[in-house]
Image (spheres, helix red, strand yellow):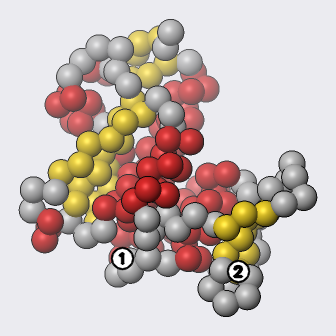
Amino acid sequence: MSDDIYFADDPPMEDMRAELLVRLAAAECPDRQTDAEIHMLLTGVHCWQGPGDDWVAQYKDTAGWEELPAYTASLDAALALVAKKMPDWTRSVDATLPSAGIDVVLHPGWPRGSLTASLVDLKDTTGTHASEAIATCIALLRAYPIAMADAASGSTPVMGGEEGVRK
């Protein structure tokens, strides 16, 4: 993808998500184009590079624009996106051996069960990287389809594969 403007439906969203996950896992440093693609995928907002290294996001419901958050460079920006897109979810971080990568796990607020059970049951929502911000982006991109499916069904997974209805 070499164009400066991306549309949320081109390429197909699942292909874009898979490509982003591969690139993020291999990333050696933050990347503004990747930030733009994450933003476009999860918000549907058009992004482009302005003069210099400034990236902006155009919002359809207003005539304005705002600076694109630096998700891959800023843990605060990555966490703000998690909070916006998956407000009922929380995260745990394991940096016991940073040289092996920082593990970030996203999991929903559980109606019952333990943190240990949620980590085992939701291993598909883990991101690992030397950068905590990038690990958080990986976890978000992996967890987002699960969160959307759960939101659509009105339920959330709980220990032992049961389902619990959100109140």
Amino acid type at image mark 1: Ala
Element type at mark 1: helix
Q: Residue at x 29, y 14 (%)?
A: 112
Classify 67 as above or below 123: below
Pick whichever, 57 or 112, lies toward us: 57
Q: Of the residues tagged 2 and 1, which is closer to the observer?
A: 2
Instruction: Give the x, y percent position of residue 163.
Output: 40, 15
Q: Outermost residue, bottom direction?
A: 52
Instruction: Give the x, y percent position of residue 68.
Output: 64, 66
Pick whichever, 97 or 126, lies toward us: 97
Q: Outermost residue, right direction?
A: 63
Instruction: Give the x, y percent position of residue 45.
Output: 74, 58
Classify 71 as above or below 166: below
Mark earlier in primary sequence (2, 1): 1
Q: Which residue is mark 1?
A: 26
Q: Quadrant of residue 134?
A: bottom left
Q: Which residue is mark 2?
A: 49
